[in-house]
Amino acid sequence: MRTACILLTALAALAAYYVYLPLPGNLSDPWKLMLLDATFRATQQMCHLIGYLRLSHHLIALNFLICTFDKLDFASHKDIKITDTVFDGVEVRVYQPPAKEDEGLKRSVVYIHGGGWALARAKMSAYNNLCRIMAESLNAVVVSVEYRLVPEVCFPEQWYDALRATKHFLQPDVLAEYSVDPSRIAISGDSAGGNLAAAVCQQLSKDEHLTIRPKLQALIYPVLQAFDFSTPSYQQNMNIPILRRTVMIDYWTYYLNANSDLTPSLLINNHTALDVGQAASFRERLNWTSLLPSSFKKTYKPVIQTTGKAEIMQEVPALLDVRAAPLLAEDETLQLQPKTYILICENDVLRDDGMMYAKRLEKAGVEVTLDHFEDCFHGCMIFTSWPADFSAGVQTRDSYIKWLDENL
């Protein structure tokens, strides 16, 4: 009995050690976040073991488990019609609110889900519920894009999928089929989906053959660059769940089909050192010392290596491709962007990506709303249902939908 008590105490101590993380005092629901993070870390480690044993690719295993645990969806769909279809070879899920008597054309949102270009699905309950609520709250047609994922495909295929689906939807006959007002369409996404939404919006703005373009873009804690992994938010939040700095770099290497051995070099910005000629023309576009407010910069210093590894850019040229990193776009492209909403969270490595994009868009003459949440963390907007129900999720979701309602 005594041995059992000692063993249980030791196991409890180990569990507490694994779960507990020192978190900033301004984070909402800290213990719930610790439990969520511990669950996700344990699942990731198990999937890495599966990959090490060559039973499956670890990302395939991880996505399988995420989608398996996510199958239960008790939310009522009310009168929303949900249809799975294909737009130019790309799977999409369309949410249509019921038509009302004497009602005109509806507004619409094209939504691209997050997940590091490798995880989640448009059909999983977190995104299904978000898009359903958007359709209900906005009385809008919502198109959720089911782009292909890593490791099945890598960049630029995810971008092509999102672009093809969006361009197909923007055709006048397709919009008429869904009773959508061509002048009231937004493109939106969160995290990696925000990356794809921004990159697609940039491409659409330059397409001279398009007669219909999005009225708005709404980006939720978007990932926008792989040039500098030592911005103040990357330094400040490097160990904050659920997106640590090393994890974000890993997802970049997966997306760009790069060797994971490059991670240590990327971590210290060896790929954009002063002697790496390919990076020189982009440096000012990501100069956070001029783009970030002092409240973000604090006492952090830029990490710019004098000598680095030019071969990284030769091996992975997509690191400087604006389709992968929309923050690198030239001013002439930014001037063409529609009215923009960018939501950022204080406790997120990607906070400064969003802030820098907002500043560059504003300088280019674009009207921008920056929604900064002091107590929120990366990914929070999809965590609104039990057991992962966070006040931060409801807070950010409601603010996002409110902006769309007022501006679309």
Image (cartoon, rainbow, N blue to C red):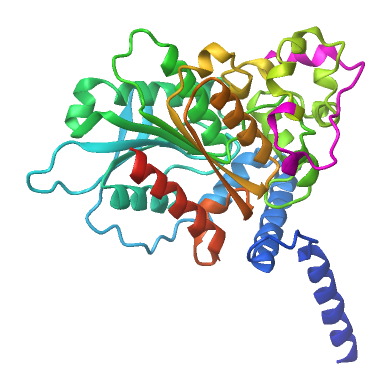
* Percent position of residue 333, x then y: 52, 14
Give the tally of numbered discs: 0
Left or right of 77 on screen, residue 72:
right
Choose top left, top right, bottom left or bottom right for residue 31: bottom right
Choose top left, top right, bottom left or bottom right for residue 88: top left
Q: Residue furthest right?
A: 307
Q: Quadrant of the C terminus?
A: top left
Residue name at image x 80 percent, y 63 percent = 18
Q: Which residues are magenta?
A: 290-317
Left or right of 9 on screen, residue 27:
left
* Percent position of residue 253, x then y: 71, 28
Residue name at image x 54 percent, y 67 percent = 387
* Percent position of residue 351, x then y: 66, 41
Q: Who is closer to the viewer here, 160 or 286?
A: 286
User: Was residue 311 drawn as part of the magenta stretch in this picture?
Assistant: yes
Q: Who is closer to the viewer here, 161 or 214?
A: 214
**Image height check: is 356 above or below 232?**
above
Left or right of 178 on screen, residue 274:
right
Residue 53: tell me if it is visible: no
User: Was residue 258 drawn as part of the magenta stretch in this picture?
Assistant: no
Residue 405: tell me if it is visible: yes
Residue name at image x 76 percent, y 34 percent = 231
**Image height check: is 30 above or below 188?**
below
Choose top left, top right, bottom left or bottom right for residue 356: top right
Residue name at image x 51 percent, y 27 percent = 198
Q: Residue furthest bottom?
A: 1
Q: Who is closer to the viewer here, 368 or 31?
A: 368
* Percent position of residue 152, x then y: 56, 29
Q: Quadrant of the N terminus?
A: bottom right
